[in-house]
Image (tube, rainbow, N blue to C red):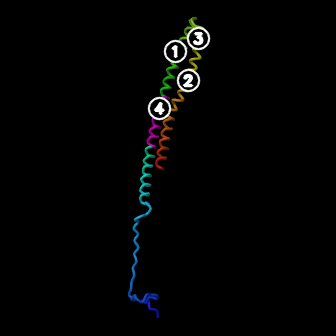
Amino acid sequence: MVDFHAIPVRDDRLSASYVVVGVNIQIPIFNGFLFNARTREAELRSQAAKQQILDLRKRISRDVRTSWLNARTSYERVAGSRQLLDQANQALDLAQTRYNLGLGSIVELSQGQLQQTQAEIGSAQKFSVGQNFTYNGCKFDHSVVNLCREGSTR
């Protein structure tokens, strides 16, 4: 029969009712500045995130201003082109009237027709640019969405 209370190898100076409890406590007095390094890393990551947000805001602001100026320029070009076309039509009417009355030459009439044709071509080109006004707005909206998505994934 086996005696469970008997210690197989023991010091004879110890009684049979001897009990031992061990406790291990670690107090990191010197840990190689690990906690300071982790704190500094967290601070730097926070600063980097704030800088990315600031950069994103500046890029959005720049894109808004650029799109606004491009749209305004397109609109003003269309208005200027219409004025040029109106003036070319008036010049052609004047040249046609002078030619019909015998006061102008065929060269003057041809010049008036050429200027009127060039103004119509320019107006058509500017009108297509003016229609891109809406396209520029869509392009702008798309760029803002992309910028916002980029900023949220960082």
Q: Secondary structure at mark 3?
A: helix
Labels 4 and 3: the sequence-earlier one = 4
Q: Which residue is mark 4?
A: 69
Question: Mark 2 falls on what kind of element?
Answer: helix
> Residue type at mark 3?
Glu
Range of the magenta residues?
55-73
Three-letter amino acid code at disc 4?
A: Leu
Circle 4 crowding by C-alpha within 10 Å: few under 14, some 14–19, many from 20: few
The residue labelled by disc 1 is: 90
Magenta stretch: residue 72 in it? yes
Q: Looking at the image, which residue is at 41% across and 58% down?
A: 36
Q: As shown in the figure, which amino acid type bears the numbered disc 1?
A: Gln
Height in image: 129 above or below 20?
Answer: above
Q: Residue at x 51, y 29 (%)?
A: 130
Q: Badge 2 is on which residue?
A: 122
Look at the numbered disc 4 and give the secondary structure of its residue.
helix
Q: Earlier in the sequence, mark 2 or mark 1?
A: 1
- Identify the mark nearer the N-term, 1 or 4: 4
